[in-house]
Amino acid sequence: MTAERMDDAARRLGRAAEVAGALSALAVLALVVVMSANVLLRYGFSLGSVWAQELEWHLMAPIALFGMVWALKRGEHVRVDVLYERFPPRAKAVADILACILGLVIAMAITWLSWKYVAQSFANAEGSANPGGIPYRWVLKGLIPAGFVLLALQYAAEILSACARFRRA
């Protein structure tokens, strides 16, 4: 496969990361609105809602799970830049390939291991233990494999991109 075809495939896979980033941003916006409303209702009108408070915590899941995919695509992930910046281009590509293979394996393992957890929650129709809380907690738990599938796709895109850079160097 040529470097251009690898870059094209990486770009196509990377579109999922853009969608994940948009969903994460929407969840952040929703979190700001919900938290602001909760504060206004609690301190302005002495009203509170278990459902609204739980929603604050539930919105953290898509922020983290989809945000990590977007961060990887944008290169905002953790790396030891002090060493990495001194590497020649081919060594950088090899380091990226190895790191992304490891990340891909971990993302696939978490996806695989989380299915049983989500299925059990679905089978039990798990909801909030609190009266007036959010039902269907299994939907929230279903974001775990979804987020890690998207992360695995982005790792695959990063591997293709690093292979293309390696070929060009």
Image: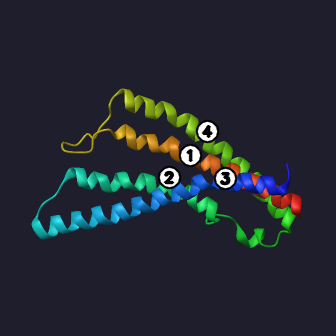
Which of the two discs, 4 and 2, labels the residue nearer the N terminus? 2
Nearest-to-viewer mark from 4 and 3: 3
Residue ID for mark 1 = 148
* Camera sees residue 77: no
Q: Which mark is residue 12?
A: 3
Structural distance between the alpha carbons of marks 4 and 2:
15 Å
Q: Residue at x 34, y 40 (%)?
A: 137
Residue ID for mark 2 = 65
Q: Nearer the viewer, residue 6 or 85?
A: 6
**Type of the residue with mark 1:** Phe
Which of the two discs, 3 and 1, labels the residue nearer the N terminus? 3
63 lies left or right of 50: right
Q: Position of residue 103 (x, y in %)?
A: 67, 49
**Type of the residue with mark 4:** Ala
Q: Where is residue 1 in the image (x, y as percent from the top left)?
A: 85, 48
At label 2, counting other C-alpha atoms closer than 10 Å, the crowd grade (few under 14, some 14-19, many 20 or more) is many
At label 3, counting other C-alpha atoms closer than 10 Å, the crowd grade (few under 14, some 14-19, many 20 or more) is few
Residue ID for mark 4 = 109
Nearest-to-viewer mark from 1 and 4: 1
